Image (cartoon, helix red, strand yellow):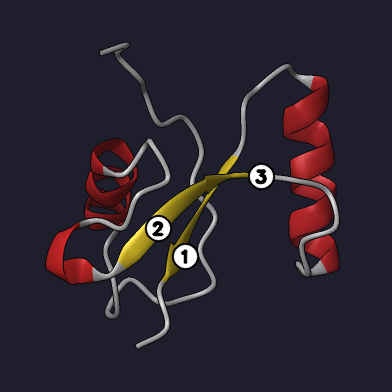
Amino acid sequence: MKAYKVLDIFSYVSEKAISLKQIEELFLNGMHGSEYGDEGYEVSIYEQGYDIDENIRMAVFDLENEGKKLHLLKRMKR
């Protein structure tokens, strides 16, 4: 499997709810878009059209211009 490195993390939730380390681990373990274990998270490739805050949209634009690949980590609905 190809090695990945998480370079930038943007989160809508506080670190009390989920730490940056947990986000990175969930991302790396769920890279193939499948639900990750009992945590109930899914990793997906970022696509334009997602409903995101304007500040995040500007950051996404900058990261895309730098040639970075973007993914979203979403909690699955239960």
Q: Return the disc, 2 or 1, that comes first in the chain's sequence.
A: 2
Disc 1 crowd rating (10 Å Cα; few below 14, some 14-19, many 20+) is some
**Pointer 3: what residue?**
46
Mark pair 2, 3: CA separation: 12 Å
Residue 63 placed where, x, y %? 72, 31
Given residues 72 and 32, the one toward you in this image is: 32
Residue 6 placed where, x, y %? 40, 31
Q: Secondary structure at mark 1?
A: strand
Disc 2 crowd rating (10 Å Cα; few below 14, some 14-19, many 20+) is many
29 left or right, relative to 42: left
Disc 3 crowd rating (10 Å Cα; few below 14, some 14-19, many 20+) is few
Q: Secondary structure at mark 2?
A: strand
Residue 14, quarter of the rendered image: bottom left
Residue visible at 42% across and 83% down? 77
Residue type, mark 1 in image: Lys
Above-or-below relation of 40 to 16:
above
**Pointer 1: what residue?**
74
Given residues 40 and 16, the one toward you in this image is: 40
Residue visible at 34% across and 64% down? 41
Evaluate if marks 2 and 1 touch, with contact meaning CB atoms under 8 Å apart.
yes
Evaluate if marks 2 and 3 touch, with contact meaning CB atoms under 8 Å apart.
no
13 left or right, relative to 68: left
Residue 52 placed where, x, y %? 76, 67
Residue 39, quarter of the rendered image: bottom left
Residue visible at 35% across and 49% down? 34
Mark pair 2, 1: CA separation: 5 Å
Q: Secondary structure at mark 3?
A: loop
Above-or-below relation of 32 to 77:
above
Mark pair 1, 3: CA separation: 11 Å
**Pointer 2: what residue?**
42
Residue type, mark 3 in image: Tyr
Residue type, mark 2 in image: Glu
